[in-house]
Amino acid sequence: MIRRALSVLPTRPIVYLVPLIVIAVLSFYYADLYSRCTAARDFRASLNEALRSNGATSTFRLADATGFDWDRVRIVTGFRPERSGNDCPFGWNWADGEREPLIASGRLTALLFVHKGALVNFLEVRADEVAFADIESSLSAEEAAFSVDSNADGGYSLALRR
């Protein structure tokens, strides 16, 4: 019975192993890519929700809206990357065709989070949803505290609290 079962297998097991190895490698790659891309999309949604629930009467601390450790943030308004392609396929981060018009119109803002001198996270937000005003340098987690106002686009304008 075992001999009959083995007789149906090809004489070269590599025929089965190569596709299985390729599938395993691609699965690990896309699982990591999917988690990074959806985390960025979820951050934008949670940031908007935090701003909506916070209201304009109190201070909004950026550190309270992030789920990772960082000690400095650099906020780059009007962000224009050198290449316009999106590293996240299948609309996992940005819906198809959403990011490119934001780049072209200067309505993309990048938040670069650093911990102990190393970049730990890079997130992009729509400037018409979350507009940061007059930020010239990087901010510590304590300095990244903002007053919040609603803007005409239905989003929020954030200005540094002094």
Image: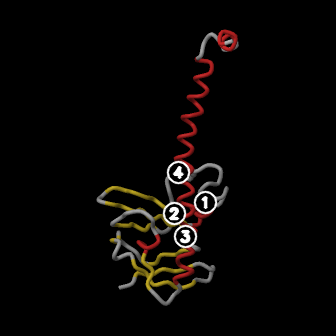
Q: Quadrant of the N terminus?
A: top right
Task: Report x, y in % for residue 135.
Answer: 40, 75
User: Which dot marks residue 124?
Assistant: 2
Task: Report x, y in % for residue 4.
Answer: 70, 10
Q: Nearer the viewer, residue 1 or 48?
A: 1
Q: Amino acid at mark 4?
A: Arg
Whether residues under marks 1 and 2 lie with C-beta atoms below 8 angstroms apart, the answer is yes
Mark nearer the viewer, 3 or 4? 3
Q: Amino acid at mark 3?
A: Ser
Q: Which coloring applies here?
A: secondary structure
Q: Quadrant of the C terminus?
A: bottom left
User: Which dot marks residue 46?
Assistant: 3
Q: Amino acid at mark 2?
A: Glu
Q: Residues within 10 Å of mark 4 (few under 14, many from 20)?
A: few
Cα–Cα span, label 1 and label 3: 19 Å
Whether residues under marks 3 and 2 lie with C-beta atoms below 8 angstroms apart, the answer is no
Disc 3 secondary structure class: helix
Cα–Cα span, label 3 and label 4: 27 Å
Residue under label 4:
83
Mark nearer the viewer, 1 or 3? 3
First reached walking from the N terminus: tag 1 or tag 2: 1
Residue under label 1:
99
Q: Amino acid at mark 1?
A: Arg
Disc 4 secondary structure class: loop
Mark nearer the viewer, 3 or 2? 3
* Residue drawn at x 62%, y 21% as measured from the top left: 16
Q: Residues within 10 Å of mark 3 (few under 14, many from 20)?
A: some
Cα–Cα span, label 4 and label 1: 12 Å
